[in-house]
Image (cartoon, rainbow, N blue to C red):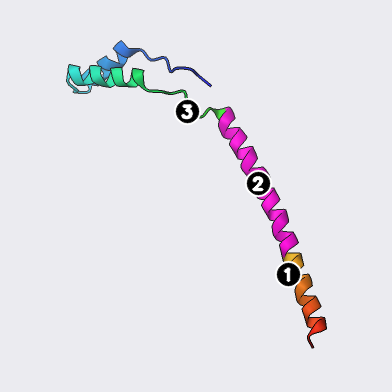
Amino acid sequence: MPAALRLDTLKFAKRLTDAGLPREAAEAIVEGSNEADLSELATRADVAEVKTAISDLRANLYSRLWVMGLGIVGLNVALMKLLP
């Protein structure tokens, strides 16, 4: 996971001021973006891992659904035989 996002702060502040933002506001935004904690951002590998886990859970739930369905059908057949 990347430790920090490298950003050209001078260029970023210049783009903000060129867009019409006051210099003080642009500097505050740049400082805030530098202080942001990006260590908890998910990487592509993290997203792929979560997708794999979800896929595995889906397959597990699908197989359990079939087992439960077959059990219900079997119970209904048994009850129909026992209770005419």
Q: Quadrant of residue 55?
A: top right
User: Which residue sits at x=69%, y=54%?
Assistant: 62
Mark 1 vs mark 2, CA separation in Å: 22 Å
Answer whether residue 74 is visible to the viewer in this image.
Answer: yes
User: Which residue sits at x=27%, y=22%?
Assistant: 29
Q: Which mark is residue 72?
A: 1
List x then y, in percent, for residue 61.
67, 53
* For residue 20, side relative to residue 1 (left or right): left
Mark 3 vs mark 2, CA separation in Å: 24 Å
> Hey, what amino acid is under mark 2?
Leu
First in sequence: mark 3 vs mark 2: 3
List x then y, in percent, for residue 16.
25, 20
- Above or below, 17 relative to 50: above
First in sequence: mark 3 vs mark 1: 3
Query: What are the residue bounds of the magenta stretch?
Result: 45-68
* For residue 69, side relative to residue 39 (left or right): right
Q: Quadrant of residue 53?
A: top right
Mark 3 vs mark 1, CA separation in Å: 45 Å
List x then y, in percent, for residue 32.
30, 21
List x then y, in percent, for residue 79.
78, 79
- Above or below, 82 relative to 62: below
